Amino acid sequence: YFFDKLAESIKGATDLLSGKSRMTEANTKGALRDIRRALLDADVSKVVVDDLVERVTKNALGGEVTEGVDPSQRGVKIVYDELKRAMGGDDEALMSGGEGEQSVRAELEYREDGKPTVVLLCGLQGAGKTTAAAKLALRLQQEEGRKPLLVAADVYRPAAVEQLKLLGEQVGVPVYAEDFEPGQGNAVAIAERGLKEAQARDDVDVVVVDTAGRQVIEADLMRELRDVRQVTQPDETLLVLDAMTGQAAAGVAKQFDDAVPLTGAVLTKLDGDARGGAALSVRAVCGRPIKYVGVGERVQDLEPFFPARMASRILGMGDVVSLVEKAERLQSKDDAASQMERIVAGKATFDDFLEQTKMMASMGNLQNVAKMMPGMGGLDAGKLSEAEARIKIQESLIMSMTPAERRDPDLVIRSKSALSRQRRIARGAGRDADASRRFVSEFQQMRTMMQKMAAGQNPNAPPGPED
Ligand code: GDP
């Protein structure tokens, strides 16, 4: 795979630490130097490398020793965490689609006011914009149940309009295009009319606008892009970036971001022999996540981008990472006492809840536990397996929350985005919206009850004004 070499070098570097009892400035120096060189060799931009290495250093020297974890393994985990972070893996705005961490990613932001969502694609010529437009339309249609319209607003590259029409036919998506004399096309007017068409049709709910690029960034082109943005008011402005751009990727991302604030990027040609550094640079340079990656020339070769998966792929050492995670979890255990304190005070987080349920599950299934409890042996088996099924559903819902949501339930209970978060969580867990709404409200009821008990009130008293 494209990161093979980087993975190998980082492994070599962290191996330097194996057998050491802990990380010190002296024994990490060589490893850090090697990691730095490996990242630069992979075309990660220099500012990003400096920042990454600095953070790795700080964590390596600052951290505590975890029982059962060798410094080389801890080194791998630290590098993994920082790679993930550099690609946006800890971002609040990221969406989780089940399976926890590994499937946390940035999704497209759709409008909710009934108007079509507008996605504007920009980038240098040859980056793969036109191809990406068709790929994205196909994906939105097939995987996300959307009704896309493609708009051909690349009026500079002579074949671009024809190419998009052909691709549109191939993926079965309508294309808005206009005929014009060479050199006479007006991208802004075409984009505007394309959007009007989309708004008038009831078989369209998302518009993907292809724009012109050149080999280098030129002022008039940027002006045109800004004007297109002005008339289309896009919900998403995605930079299509060739992964083979190498060191230059960071500069390109920065310049486009300055012209038309980007909301994300599509990284193309990751199937080629690109060294992949761009994946690590984009996010750090313009603070926007990669949303999709192109992995081939065919229209179906577009995939969502998952920072955590990408980080494990880069390192190729997922097993070491999960081992260290487990050991760290065991050690911190958040000490059970403070967890209990939070629960009793009515401040339980979803993490606390999950851990409690897991503890119950680890005691054997509920039925067996019940048999051992005085007075519960006779509990109806049907009721018990119903409770077990409910716990499974709750677990899957929590697993599809982002780490931030698990720590701070208010995000899901009462924030401005609570409703859309609940819907997304349900979708990620493969449940209907009702399931997550019900769970969240039960969870909140439990917290309120605990708060009342903590305050010495009768939990069954009618709700006070603060509810
Ligand atoms: P545009 O000028 O930005 O619109 O670029 P195009 O969409 O015409 O793409 C330029 C070339 O890159 C074409 O030959 C595409 O087939 C190719 N291409 C685009 N995306 C990918 C990708 O993900 N992988 C590979 N291997 N080729 C790609």
Image: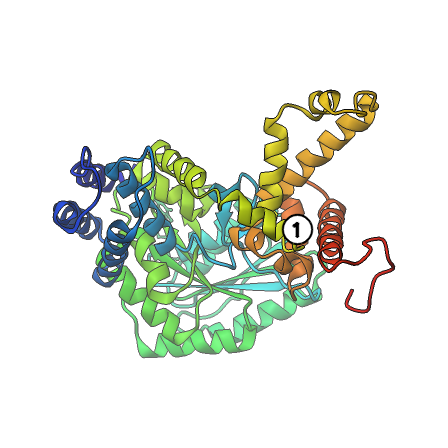
- Does residue 96 appear to the left or right of 268 in the view shown? right
Spot occupied by residue 393 in the image (x, y as percentages of width and height): 68, 37
- Does residue 318 appear to the left or right of 467 in the view shown? left
Q: Residue furthest right?
A: 462
The residue at the point 40 percent across, 66 percent down is: 212
- Does residue 465 appear to the left or right of 294 in the view shown? right
Q: Residue furthest front?
A: 456
Residue at mark 1: 344
Spot occupied by residue 354 in the image (x, y as percentages of width and height): 60, 41
Residue 138, compared with residue 393, is above or below; it is below
**Disc 1 Cβ-to-ligand 1 distance below 8 Å:** no
The C terminus lies in quadrant = bottom right
Spot occupied by residue 408 in the image (x, y as percentages of width and height): 58, 57
The residue at the point 43 percent across, 52 percent down is: 89
Near-viewer residue (189 or 100) = 100
Near-viewer residue (141 or 53) = 53
Q: Is residue 139 visible?
A: no
At label 1, which amino acid type do we have?
Val
Spot occupied by residue 282 in the image (x, y as percentages of width and height): 34, 59
The residue at the point 67 percent across, 40 percent down is: 394
The residue at the point 32 percent across, 42 percent down is: 77
Secondary structure, mark 1, is helix
- Does residue 278 appear to the left or right of 290 in the view shown? left
The N terminus lies in quadrant = top left
Q: Is residue 397 visible?
A: yes
Coloured how?
rainbow
Residue 140, compared with residue 221, is above or below; it is above
Callout 1: 10 Å neighbours few (<14), some, many (20+)?
some
Residue 336, compared with residue 48, is above or below; it is above
